[in-house]
Image (spheres, rainbow, N blue to C red):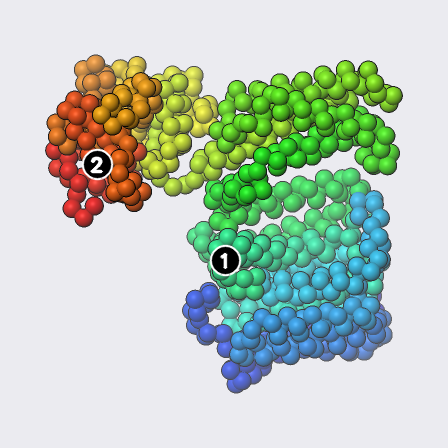
Amino acid sequence: MSPFLTFVLPAVVAAVLALGLTPIVARFAVMIGAIDMPGERKIHVRPIPRLGGLAVVSAIAIVWIGSRWIVDGAWHLPSELVFAVGVGVLPILAVSMVDDIRSMPAGPKFIAHLLGAVIAVAVGARLGSDVHLFGATIHIGFLTYPLSVLWIVGITNAFNIIDGLDGLATGLALIAATSMAAVFVLVGQPVMAGAALVVAGALVGFLPYNMHPARLFLGDTGATAIGFCLAVFALRGGSTLSSGFAALLPIFIMGLPIADTLIAVARRVVIRLEDRHGGVFVADRNHIHHRLLAHGIGHAQAVLILYGAGFVFAGAAFISMFLKAREASLFVVGLLLAGFVGVNRLGYEEFAFIRKGTVLKMYEGPVVKRSMFVVFADIAMAVFAAYIAIGLKGDAWSLRAMRASFLELSGTVVPLTVLVFWKAGLYRGVWRLAGVDDLMRVCRASAAVTLLAIVGHLIWSPEHLSFTVFLIFGLVSAALATGSRASYVVLQSSQRRASNQGTAVLVYGAGRRGVAGVRELFQHPETGFRPIGFIDDDAMKCGKLVCGLPVLGSQRELASVIRGHGVRAVMVATSKIRIDRAAAARQACEAAGVSMFRLNIELERLHEDAANGDLGAGQPTLRPVLVSAAAPAASGMDDLPVIGAEPCRSCGSRNVHRSKARNLYERFKKLHTATRLYRCHNCRWRGWLLPLEHAPIVGSDAFADLCDLTSLDRLFDGPPDTLRPASGE
């Protein structure tokens, strides 16, 4: 018999057996009540029998047992592999069949999976004691056993977790088995290749019944058994995972089920830590295939997309066998980056750490808030910068090799860093409000540390260090010190820019006033406005980025930009707009049904209230003022009425300023209401008014529309000159 038929014939027999056994198993599943009913987490809408994996497992077992007769003794499985798979899978099959008939809790199933993995590892299906990866030998010793058990349990559950769409787990298992057979042939293990092809053949025979719309499900019986079998194959004798780059081959061959499992575990851990509910073993409907369906992709198309991803992973694993260690490492990094981008496109809200402010919560911890934390953080960064400088200069990263130079440099720069930073006032700064001047102060302090370290080294150090080492240290330490102190501001800005909440606002004018307006809106998310871009009449600015936002066009393209980007409001941020262009912009906004407004920055001088001792000290203050743009005046848009805050209840004047609470009642009301005490500068009236940050947007139809768009409550009724609190507020 030819070598080709020796491998192909058992696979063909397994396919025919699975194809014939599947209808029988389907009838048996209906008889015993192994029916998957529709539900909240289910994709299907009608009852479908389970236990389809029983046909696949039976076909594989029959062919393996009769392999010596089918191929005339050309190959037969080693006894230890038969025992590892045959005995190890029994507890998994038993608990999975019960789970297919009536649902079981996660605890007993996990124990059965763990027992099967321990049996397989005890027989010999485990990692080698030395794993070779990218040209380096990693001795794992006694970790061989727990890592092997973890691998088998993980892959067993990975195929069970990915079994959420018709034909998905079956197809991915088929891709993995075929790829594994090709790798076995390449590394000179023909018997293992034949065994993997038998698994692939049985899956081919079952797949027609499992494709969308499925007539029979693989069930936990099939998904866990196939996953267990492939996991044991990958660990067979430790050879596959211990030869060159092959240490990562099984991970890539079964990459998609592994990725889905890791993502699911990470999601559930994050939910548990943040919201204090759920758990790692609590099932949900947010796996990769569910996310594809949520993006509007059809059932069959989603399965084909995931098949393609499985082929990419498997193909990458096979191609990497022909690459050198350096090329293979770059290949792996590129594939991981592509996978990261793909997962990010699925839109998992649990991993939106910046947008949700999860990272910012770390700064609220009592340890981080303590001043001594900053000192120890600077010491750690100075030591790390010294290590980087010595390593880059000598291209030797072992602490043993650089010990003398590292200790010399660290001993010099650490005390200097603490002393100079203290004298420069860096430990008195409020870094949550850090600006350019603060960061320049950090850079100057880092430069001073470097210069003093050079001088000190030349004066008293017996160890010779190159000037380049100090230069590298200065650059690295400055980058670390500046980045650590600017991190809160950067993360806070990133969170606000990444937020998808609020009314989409288009800014007219990409100059200094436009940038100031955008920053004002980002600094005050409570306004409900979210800048998405600029328009500007300067053709040279089109297509460029200003303040991180794109210039989407000019006033002529305003209508198309509004339609194409979901704009709901336009903010005029230039005082040089021509009358005809202002009128044309207003007409475009009215035609599109969006509001138009302007954000002014005013300086308001506070006055001292002699009667009650309020301190104004004549200090100017910045306040944003929304300006109606419903009817441009002849001079452009400068004559529009200013709507800034609630007016005086006595004379209607807006010349009011804050007043201090005088008694216990006023202090209590201040804590429990949104209103604040104000005194009118004109008539000396004193009472409760809504402060500027809660001022309603009134005075024109355009502002009424804008108020509706931002979902702000209508806090006041009546015309602007007779503003009064709405009933019930």
Quadrant housing residue 654: top left
Question: Residue 502: percent from the left, percent from the top?
Answer: 35, 39
Q: Is residue 57 visible?
A: no
Q: Position of residue 711 (x, y in %)?
A: 28, 43
Q: Which secondary structure, mark 1?
A: loop
Name the spot of residue 249 as percent of width and height, x first: 74, 53
291 to 392, vertically: above or below: below
Q: Residue at x 84, y 57 (%)?
A: 141
Location of residue 562 by image quarter: top left
Residue in the image at 67% along x and 18% along y: 448
Name, please, the residue furthest toward the bottom: 31
Characterize the local packing of mark 1: few (<14), some (14-19) or many (20 or more) Cα atoms within 10 angstroms. few
Task: Find the distance from the CA under tag 1 to the CA under tag 2.
Answer: 40 Å
Q: Which residue is mark 1?
A: 276
Numbered badge on residue 56: none
Task: List the residue tagged with mark 2.
Answer: 688
Asked where in the image residue 686 lies, by quadrant, the reply is: top left
Looking at the rendered structure, the kind of residue marked 1 is Arg
Seen from the viewer's position, the closer of residues 729 and 140 is 729
Q: Horizontally, is 412 left or right of 576 in the view? A: right
Front-most of residues 102 and 374: 374
- Please state which of residues 632 and 325 is positioned toward the viewer in this rendering: 632
